[in-house]
Amino acid sequence: WESPLSPLFLTLSPVATAAFTMLSTTVLRTAVRRIASTGSPHTKRTASSSTASRIAFKQSEQESVNYIPLMAAATMGCFGLLQQTLSSEEDATISKNAQCFWGSDNKAKEVEDKFATYWPRNIMILFGPPGAGKGTHGPKIEDLLGIPQLSTGDMLRAAVAAKSEVGLKAAAVMKAGGLVSDDIVIGIIRDRIREPDCKFGFILDGFPRTLVQAKELDKMLSEEGACVTKVVELQVPDEVLEERICGRWIHKKSGRSYHVKFAPPKSMKLDGAGNPIPESMKDDETGEALMQRPDDTASALMKRLKGYHNETVPILEHYKPSGVVAGVNANQGMDGVWGEVLGSLKRGGK
């Protein structure tokens, strides 16, 4: 017996093929159980009879085939997670086959909408002191899970530019030289996470910064029928961070980051004392000048770290009883850090 899904196997990536292999195994187990239970008492007593066995298997086979669309629908719901590993050509082929399987794109859309509506949203908070690697690993998590990384600074600027109700409030406060209140920030986040790209979840970077903000975030999410599902902290000793931060140069427009020791730009030249010549620090892609942030100094870093530890520890303690907090040793090679990040993202990952 050849599964009606066989042609589809030829067009899938190894990851997607594994998903459908599990599906076929399930169908086979169903067929075997049906063979054992379908026949009459006489058929069961004469199991060696080829005619009775063929009849029972044929009936079981047909019933199993009837289950394929239902189980395939559940499997296809996973494509939202699998699609990050597919090339555009593979993705287009799968979309074409899925359309042939259901008869239209509408059915696939219905499955996707059900998963977005009834499955828990993947809501993450990414913590880490300055220089811990949030800017490096945040986008990789974003690509892996297919959910956006939301920066409070970016959301605030976007809300002001869009002149939304909460954006206008924020603009008025900033124009007066005041600090944007927690209520306004929560309102900006509430508006942002209602956008289509957040329906499966999102990653918060830079918020919450205080225990009060964490509790306000929890309250807002509960009103949306959601909650924080994972808190990941990138951990690096303070003494290591000084070397990372004080050697950091950035390209302002793109946010690309360089380091005089670990990732120098191709244009970098050193003076007689071994220090980089500022005029030689150029972006590899555009050739534009790089800059150092005013607070990327040893004295400013110590102040920032003190504030980070004082504010972050209570937030981590707040979420620990929920079993969602995971620590990652970010004081190792990039591959090692990413391996721990992947482990922390799994269910029960610590």
Image (tube, grey):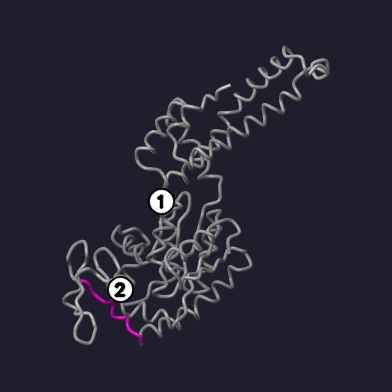
Q: Which residue is mark 2?
A: 259
Q: Quadrant of residue 65?
A: top right
Name the one closer to the observer, 181 or 198. 198
Q: Classify 344 as above or below 120.
A: below
Q: Which residue is farthest top?
A: 51
Label 1 secondary element: loop
- Of the two numbered discs 2 and 1 in the rendering, the one whose residue sits closer to the viewer: 2
Relative horizontal placement of residue 301, taking residue 329 as reference (left or right): left
Identify the residue at horizontal 40%, vertical 85% (top origin): 303
Q: Are marks 2 and 1 in contact (CB under 8 Å)?
A: no
Please state the extent of the stretch shown in magenta in the rendering: 290-298
Mark linked to residue 321: none
Label 2 secondary element: strand
**Mark 1 packing: few (<14 Cα in 10 Å), some, or many (20+)?**
few
Quarter of the figure that contains the N terminus: top right
Relative horizontal placement of residue 143, taking residue 260 as reference (left or right): right
Q: Classify 170 as above or below 272.
A: above
Quarter of the figure that contains the C terminus: bottom right
Name the one closer to the observer, 59 or 159. 59
Measured from the top left, where is residue 70 in percent x and y? 58, 31
Q: Which residue is mark 1?
A: 195
Q: Classify 220 as above or below 76.
A: below
Q: Amino acid at mark 1?
A: Glu
Identify the residue at horizontal 60%, vertical 68% (top origin): 320
- Residue 291 counted in the magenta span: yes
Q: Amino acid at mark 2?
A: His
Name the one closer to the observer, 61 or 316. 61
Relative horizontal placement of residue 344, taking residue 299 as reference (left or right): right
Distance from Cα at disc 2 to Cα at disc 1: 36 Å
Identify the residue at horizontal 22%, vertical 72% (top origin): 290
Measured from the top left, where is residue 274 in percent x and y? 24, 84
